[in-house]
Image (cartoon, rainbow, N blue to C red):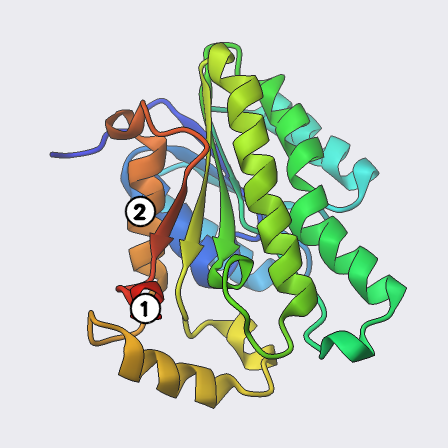
Amino acid sequence: MEINLDGKVALVTGGSRGIGRAIAKRLAEAGAAVAINYVRQATRANEVATAIREAGGRALTIRANVADPADLEAMFSVLRAEFGRLDILISNAASGVLRPAMELTHRHWQWTMDINAGTLIPLSQQAVAMMPDGGSIVAVSSLGAIRAIPNYTAVGASKAALESIVRHLALELGPRGIRVNAISAGVVDTDALKHFPNRQDLIDAAGRRTPAGRLVEPTDVADAVLFLVSPLALMVMGHTLLVDGGYSIMG
């Protein structure tokens, strides 16, 4: 069954690389006009937008730090001027401090929680104002929300908080025709994974433990996001969908 998003408008935060890049492309392939948010990766963001346009789609790039209220307001002003509406919000931008818990400072904790969990609420407040006919919000989480990973204390806690916010937003926004869900990926070898001091150990362990026999790829996550924002998932609300090739069932 083909998923058709013709006439829909999507915003993908952190859409210049990795999982965000794959999601932006997949939504565009399904027919959506896509706004690609980035902070530092202007060249990569423009590459994504160019690829979408060359394939016959509509795309623009918007530089904004989603943790900055002024940047957030400016980004949505551009969206209102360019599209006048929003149907799909993908909250993918993330950061955080990868250190043992005993080495975390208050600043490390606050930054990680703010960027990974705290931004979803102001993002959603802005997005909902542009969704009078309903829409879909998907937040990108990780297995660290439910599993212990070395050096992942702050990021894991922020992702667990993110998934809780998703459930509460789903309760609040469901009656308005806005579905809110999360997607949690297994080990994906993206630029973000390069910041892990034990990157190769994670990749090797995932390869051995994943029943599917390979690592999750960004396109696997993008396909699942496409399902969640489509009419096929109209009754999926407040759910965190695991895309990990079975990694998490191995104990």
The secondary element bearing badge 2 is classed as helix
Q: Are marks 2 and 1 in contact (CB under 8 Å)?
A: no
Q: Left or right of 188: which side holds 111?
A: right
Q: Of tags 2 and 1, which is closer to the observer?
A: 1
Is 26 drawn above or below residue 239 in the view shown? below
- The x and y percentages for residue 89 are 51, 34
First in sequence: mark 2 vs mark 1: 2
Residue at the limit of the structure toward the front, as seen here:
251
Identify which residue is drawn at 70% across, 64% down.
154
Q: Secondary structure at mark 1?
A: helix
In the rendered image, residue 139, in percent from the top left (x then y), is placed at: 51, 43
Q: Position of residue 140 (x, y in %)?
A: 50, 50
* Amino acid under disc 2: Ala
Residue on which disc 2 sits? 224
When the figure is inspected, residue 202 is found, relative to residue 138, above or below; the finding is: below
Quadrant of the rendered image containing residue 124: top right
Mark 1 residue crowding within 10 angstroms, few (<14) / some (14–19) / many (20+): many
Q: Residue furthest right?
A: 106
Instruction: Tell me, yes or no, if residue 56 can be seen here.
Output: no
Which residue in the protein does label 1 denote? 247
Residue at left offset 77%, top offset 40% = 71
| Spot occupied by residue 215 in the image (x, y as percentages of width and height) | 31, 73
Quick one: 98 or 23, which is closer to the camera? 98
**Residue 187 seen in this snapshot:** yes
Of residue 35 and residue 200, the one placed in the foreground of this image is 200
CA distance for labels 2 and 1: 16 Å
Can you say whether 83 is above or below 156 in the image?
Answer: above
Tag 1: amino acid: Tyr
Query: Horizontally, is 74 left or right of 152 in the view?
Result: right
Q: Residue at x 46, y 40 (%)?
A: 59
